[in-house]
Image: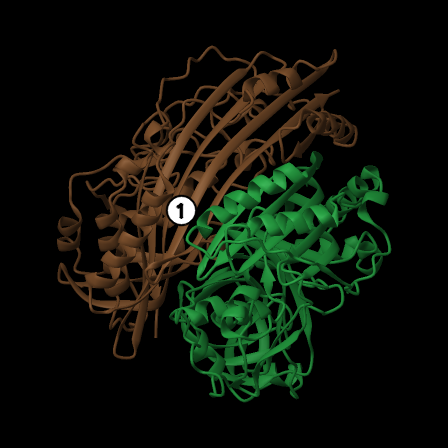
Chain colours: A brown, B green
Amino acid sequence: MPELLEIAQRIAAQARPGEQIEAYVSWHRETEVRAFEGAVESLSSAEAAGVGIRVISGQRQGFAYVGDLDESHAREALAEARDNARFSSIDEHAGVAAPDGVAPETIELWNEALLDYPNEKKIACALELERLVRSGDPRIRQVVSTDYGDACGESAIANSLGIATTSRETTCYVSADVVAGEGDDTQTGGGYSVGRGPDEIIVERAAKDAIERATRLLGATKPPSAKLAVIFDPRVTATLISIIAGTLSGEEVARGRSLFADRIGEEVAASMLTLVDDPTDIRAFGASAIDDEGLACRRNVLIEDGQLAKYLYDTYSARTANTVSTGSAVRGGFKSMPGVGARALCLVPGELDQPGMIASIENGLLVQGISGVHSGVNRVSGDFSVGAEGVMIRGGRLAEPVREITIASTIQKMLQNVLAVGNDLEWLPSSAAGVSLAIGEISMSGA
Amino acid sequence: MTLSVDQDDIEQTLSLALAGGGDFAEVFIEDRRSTGISLDDGRVEEITTGRDRGAGIRVVVGDTTGFAHTADISLAGLAAAARAAAAVAKGGGGGVQTVALERRDSAPTSAIEIYPESVTKATKVALLERADEIARGSGSAIVQVSAGYGDSRRHFIVANSDGVYAEDDQVRTRIFVMCVANGDTGMQTGYESVAHTIGYELFDRMGIDEIAAKAANRAITKLSARPAPSGIVPIVLKSGSGGILFHEACGHGLEADHIVKDASVYAHRVGELVASPLVTLVDDGTVTDEWGTSSIDDEGYPTQRNVLIKDGILTDYMWDLLRARKEGRPSSGNGRRQSYQHLPMVRMTNTYLLPGADDPEEIIAQTESGVYVAHLGGGQVNTATGDFVFGMTEAYLIENGEITEPIRDANLIGNGPDVLGKIDAVGDDFDMCPGTCGKDGQSVPVGCGQPTMRISGVTVGGTAGA
């Protein structure tokens, strides 16, 4: 494989006087095995690579990419990016990241064991998961698919101001997609196990997870509408805090598109709530030593004891706000320009476990899953209305399962109405960790 | 724009892919160029152009599919990918198979008048600046405007060991405008997008001023919105964007991959009444210029008009080549993939409900109380249970048969088969909307459509008493 950093540096070195160039070069290789009914349904193996080039010239910015590492194609992309810059608006804040002196932490995200793990074992893993799920519970009606997947990837960023960084990581997972049934009732569920390498995968856990999620709502009914307290399961909380972090992006704040604009220092949440984004925490799936502009990632406290403390910034949004980057540049790969994003969100855990939280609620709902988040949450107005399923809580105990309901409030009210943060912190394959979270006064719409 | 790949090279690659045995091999070679321009906060801040070239090769042995892709479309690159895909074919019959390809002509569904690459970047930039100006001029409450323009040209060749050799050159143009309005009760958003499988003539047919004003007015209208009701209420869906309900609540469950795995509520139900007799549902990849339209699918088969539900009775599912082969039937032209880096699977094209006989005005007038949904956002469905959820992004109360006050954004939740049975009025109007459908990590452009119609009861997830 070619040296990615050398390619990036060669591109960045072509900057003309008065011009800035940033090159992002990435490569990755992945394998995915899908099993169905005791056989391999599909096995994909692929390598992909590409180069994204950003040019800033005369305070105008242009971007172009190409989906391979051919240097003649990269030269064409550079010419395209230069041409694109001619047509964008003048923006005094446009610019690539300048080295800021913050040293990146050493974080090992590379598991060598993954590289020569043979296909036979990958296949065996997917088949074993299917067998475990099928035989794990008589109510399992169909195992739609079980997957084993792994990937290793490297990326390099170089710019004409002297940034020159590389990073690499491996990831590995197994997952199952399951249908369970009892009588006329059908429910679905998914389970997984993730790690940096095959040695970190626990197939049994994925099987148990899938079976539990597919069967727990069997017999669920649609309850009458009510206003009540809810407890979010850790995975649901992870989704919620990802949404909240999206509204704390310096870019959205600067554009007047955040419900939290101009509110630093205000009490935006109940006092037991502290929200942190710390990509240097090795336990996080999104852990990273450097951000996607080549600056060091760092621990950022966004909400501290209920008080709004900080927004996240990349270089551009920081300049518009007259501050400095928080090392929070992210991008969707070589095809996109950097933007602002969280990588490793986490609520600081509280004292109670989930049973303890349930015991403290007289009339409520344990929310085990939400849907329609994309369409049901307005990050500008804060309106929150999502599909939900879970188990009713009566007199401090779990009661009957419910489905086909919605829960609605606003993000602002939910944060103010937090009753407790659980102690059951769970790291998930996403940009946020989960923890049980109790919130008062939510509208549940049902029958 | 052409792909410089020799037909001989493709034949050789297919032979190589099956050299170790196998029932089916396919080569998909793609060259895609795209342009994206975004305006935000009054500035054109992002102009992106990109190019992706590569090939995806699959080999099927029994029930197993091997897949590999490469960005190297030289014969050596294709050969390496073919060997990788065939690696799963071990234990197969072996022996050399030769493949003779027969070129299949496809009539282009959309005639392109102005290819996007023939329009200057300055013209495209000016279009977005005009959108910004019109949106901001729509009312002093508009405090933020963002707009995006995108075009793409995708040329691909697909050939398989059944002898199919097909090519397509697809052009897509789209624009969106998003506005934020600020008022006494906080901020609200309004969004509008237009997208067609045509070139820049899109903006001769559909004025940018109209698109921008629509987005702005949607945001302004919502400033005075009341909380949405909570509970089961009748809803009237305005023609157009409500089509997503049928895409989500019903279309996904009719995709053959879910059917053959018995993971759909609609499995084993052909010939049964699955909807109100007022419902005739069609998936049609041939509708002129619509967002889900193409002359052939990504497996080289012509798209067609497939009637899925006729007068409430389930008539057929949607098929890709792999699932169809297994059932011994032809593909319905629904095999699609995001790019050469993805395996094709069963996907919808343009999915819509046919118009009925009712006057849309009358449908509203005959609704004592309920919600009028003028615009729906995205949604999500569980195909195994039929449970769906989707968001209202412009909606009003219906009181005493009249549309009255706007309501705030909220989700609707329901069950597909249940809702299909509760359709009690279907209008004689019709409209379609573009969308992006995500499935199993792949996104493809689709169209959705429907006439104005009423559903006798759906759960609305608001915060006010129903």
Left or right of A242: which side holds B366? Answer: right
Count the marks.
1
Determine the residue positioned at 59% across, 56% down. Answer: B97
Q: Position of residue A398 (x, y in %)?
A: 16, 62
Vertical comparison of A388 with B240: above or below: above
Instruction: Give amino acid for label 1.
Output: Gln
Asked if A114 appears above or below A225 in the picture, the reply is: above
Residue at figure coordinates x 44%, y 19% from the top left: A296
Could you tell me which secondary element the residue under label 1 belongs to?
A: helix
Split into 4 quadrants, where in the image is the C terminus of chain A? Answer: bottom left
Left or right: residue A438 versus residue B259 is left
The residue that label 1 is drawn on is A412
Above-or-below relation of B125 to B450: above
Q: Nearer the viewer, residue B445 or A416?
A: B445
For the question of whether residue B89 can be seen, the reply is: yes
Q: Is residue B71 visible?
A: no
Q: Position of residue A24 (x, y in %)?
A: 58, 26
Q: Quadrant of residue B330?
A: bottom right
Q: Is residue B439 above or below residue A64?
A: below
Going by the image, does A231 lie left or right of B100? left
Q: Image quadrant of residue A394?
A: bottom left
What residue appears at the point 62 percent right and 21 percent down from the top-left corner? A22
Residue A224 appears at what percent x and percent y?
30, 73
Chain for mark 1? A
| Residue beneath the point at 53% across and 13% down | A99
Q: Position of residue A292 (x, y in %)?
A: 51, 27
